[in-house]
């Protein structure tokens, strides 16, 4: 018998609301089933022997792969789905550690969403109301000004005040009933109890060693290396000063197949004309073949490859002819010991499975980085560009001695921007022109074109910049240069597992 139901006639569940501060923006982590259900926060039943708070912590780890400091008292509660749905008691959880793999990674996907935008993803009215209260409660200015421990204590005082003011707790009787229900259920179900700190909504610092996601690192002066980029491309001022005549958008907002909802990279095939290759950033090791209009023409499983966080794809040469290079290079927490680039002979769209892929494992010379950009030059040189979320934006090169199956130490070529760049200025994709003369680096808001010879020599200079904001991409990540000169852009769907979108640019670059 469900003890909570026997006490109240209503099932009681627990939920965690994972949050972080990223570049001054408060974000919450949402999850959804890969089968296509709506976005929610991690939640589930209250486990015997754990209690509501620790059960909420467990749900955050199992469903979303995060750990951190969780409130000792509930922040709020809501009815899930409908008025007679289960009562969900929600705890705030300040994320200090984010795993790249977690127990339910195959069943669920996760997404960090700014609290200002979170309502566009939700269908549960109760959760919508609670997250509006969270948005009002989390003050980014105060959080940013305080060190981690101070944030915990300031969060405690704000939670207490906010909890008294939010709509569900306007009635003291409701608050007493909910907290009384939890206490009564806990006494019956969990006679040994759980550690319970004092203070309404205070957070307990349980993970002192966890890495704080999204925090800005201090960085030493790099002798002016970041100057050209800051002045001409990756800063907001660079987008404002971009050249509107540099490119022309021939198509935008074209929907891709429903299976492609997290397109993180795109590459124009060399073997078969008119084929684009893309992938999701998690799930199965599968490439999707699509047409220049976004229609699916095939799915190919990559033999011998695994998925931790696929973030980009490139077309390039290899000993057997034409190959695709897949970058398993993402590292949201900045904690991976190494990355892997898979090289595979380019399949036909009608193939069910590829030839076995070669794996090129590598480590950074200066510690882990979150990276989403990979490009390959016509002579076969492999490069990655760090995103700028867990450190500076920098270009790294695979050494010429890199061999399949043997770990390489990447070579740091040049820093393009220091740590602490704004979210819309972080690098999310890269592509080299088929003739090897240009390299395009994209962000959420712009694309910057560098002369390849200067860039890989460590002299990036001032890039040519084109503003992508008129395309209105939900979360633009992919960029791929085709042999006919067209540049394709992909974006994640943005809400409710919506399909990713495809756009096409025609750009005129100097000789």
Image: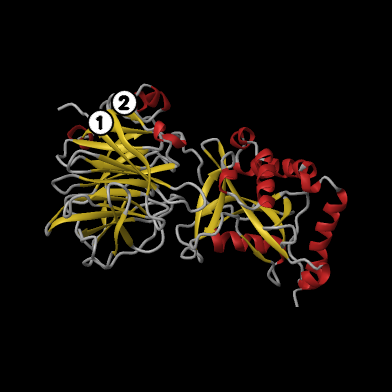
Instruction: State left or right for residue 151 relative to residue 498.
Output: right
Residue 460: give its label.
Answer: 1
As displayed, is residue 415 above or below residue 208? above
Q: Residues within 10 Å of mark 1 (few under 14, many from 20)?
A: many
Q: Nearer the viewer, residue 501 or 115?
A: 501
Q: Say which quadrant the N terminus sits in.
A: bottom right
Question: Circle 1 — which element?
Answer: loop
Q: Is residue 65 visible?
A: no
Q: Residues within 10 Å of mark 2 (few under 14, many from 20)?
A: some
Instruction: State left or right for residue 421 relative to residue 39.
Output: left
Q: Is residue 234 visible?
A: yes
Q: Nearer the viewer, residue 131 or 343?
A: 131
State the residue at coordinates (50%, 51%): 111
Image coords of residue 417 (percent x, y) = 36, 33
Instruction: State left or right for residue 184 relative to residue 158.
Output: right
Q: Which is more N-terminal, label 2 or label 1?
A: 2
Image coords of residue 254 (percent x, y) = 37, 44
Colour pattern:
secondary structure
As displayed, is residue 133 above or below residue 242? below
Residue 228: give its label.
Answer: 2
Q: Say which quadrant the C terminus sits in.
A: top left
Image coords of residue 76 (percent x, y) = 73, 51
Image coords of residue 89 (percent x, y) = 72, 57
Report which quarter residue 243 is drawn in.
top left
Question: Circle 2 — which element?
Answer: helix
Instruction: Say whether marks 1 and 2 touch (CB < 8 Å).
Output: yes
As displayed, is residue 214 above or below residue 311? above
Residue 6: give its label.
Answer: none
As displayed, is residue 449 above or below residue 162? above
């Amino acid at each position: 018998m469900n003890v909570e139901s026997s006490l109240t006639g209503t099932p009681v569940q627990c939920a965690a609301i994972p949050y972080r501060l990223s570049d001054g923006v408060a974000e919450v982590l949402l999850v959804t089933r890969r089968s296509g259900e709506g976005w929610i926060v991690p939640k589930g039943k209250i486990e015997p022997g754990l209690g509501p708070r620790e059960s909420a912590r467990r749900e955050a780890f199992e469903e979303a792969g995060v750990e951190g400091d969780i409130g000792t008292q509930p922040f709020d509660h809501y009815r899930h789905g409908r008025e007679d749905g289960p009562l969900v008691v929600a705890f705030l959880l300040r994320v200090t550690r984010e795993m790249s793999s977690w127990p339910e990674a195959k069943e669920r996907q996760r997404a960090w969403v700014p609290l200002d935008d979170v309502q566009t993803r939700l269908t549960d009215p109760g959760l919508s109301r609670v997250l509006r209260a969270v948005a009002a409660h989390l003050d980014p200015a105060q959080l940013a000004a305080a060190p981690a421990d101070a944030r915990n204590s300031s969060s405690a005082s704000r939670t207490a005040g906010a909890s008294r003011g939010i709509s569900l707790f306007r009635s003291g009787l409701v608050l007493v009933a909910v907290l009384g229900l939890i206490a009564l259920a806990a006494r019956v179900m969990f006679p040994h109890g759980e550690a319970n700190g004092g203070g309404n909504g205070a957070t307990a610092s349980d993970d002192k060693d966890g890495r704080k996601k999204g925090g800005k690192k201090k960085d030493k002066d790099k002798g002016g290396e970041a100057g050209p980029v800051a002045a001409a491309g990756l800063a907001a001022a660079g987008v404002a000063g971009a050249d509107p005549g540099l490119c022309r958008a021939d198509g935008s907002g074209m929907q891709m197949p429903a299976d492609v909802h997290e397109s993180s990279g795109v590459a124009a095939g060399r073997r078969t004309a008119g084929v684009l290759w893309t992938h999701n950033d998690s799930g199965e090791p599968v490439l999707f073949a699509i047409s220049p209009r976004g229609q699916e023409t095939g799915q190919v499983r990559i033999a011998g490859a695994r998925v931790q966080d696929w973030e980009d794809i490139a077309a390039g040469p290899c000993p057997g002819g034409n190959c695709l290079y897949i970058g398993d290079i993402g590292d949201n927490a900045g904690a991976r010991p190494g990355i892997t680039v898979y090289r595979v002979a380019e399949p036909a769209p009608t193939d069910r499975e590829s030839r076995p892929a070669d794996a090129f494992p590598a480590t950074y010379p200066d510690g882990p980085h979150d990276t989403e950009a990979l490009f390959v030059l016509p002579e076969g040189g492999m490069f990655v560009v760090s995103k700028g979320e867990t450190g500076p934006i920098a270009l790294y090169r695979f050494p010429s001695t890199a061999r399949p199956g043997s770990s390489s130490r990447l070579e740091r070529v040049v820093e393009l921007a220091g740590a602490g760049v704004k979210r819309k200025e972080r690098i999310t994709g890269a592509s080299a022109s088929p003739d090897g003369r240009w390299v395009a680096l994209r962000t959420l808001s712009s694309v910057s074109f560098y002369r390849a010879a200067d860039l890989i020599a460590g002299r990036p200079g001032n890039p040519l910049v084109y503003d992508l904001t008129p395309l209105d991409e939900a979360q633009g990540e992919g960029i791929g240069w085709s042999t006919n000169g067209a540049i394709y852009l992909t974006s994640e769907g943005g809400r409710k597992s919506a399909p990713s979108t495809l756009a096409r640019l025609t750009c005129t670059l100097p000789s």
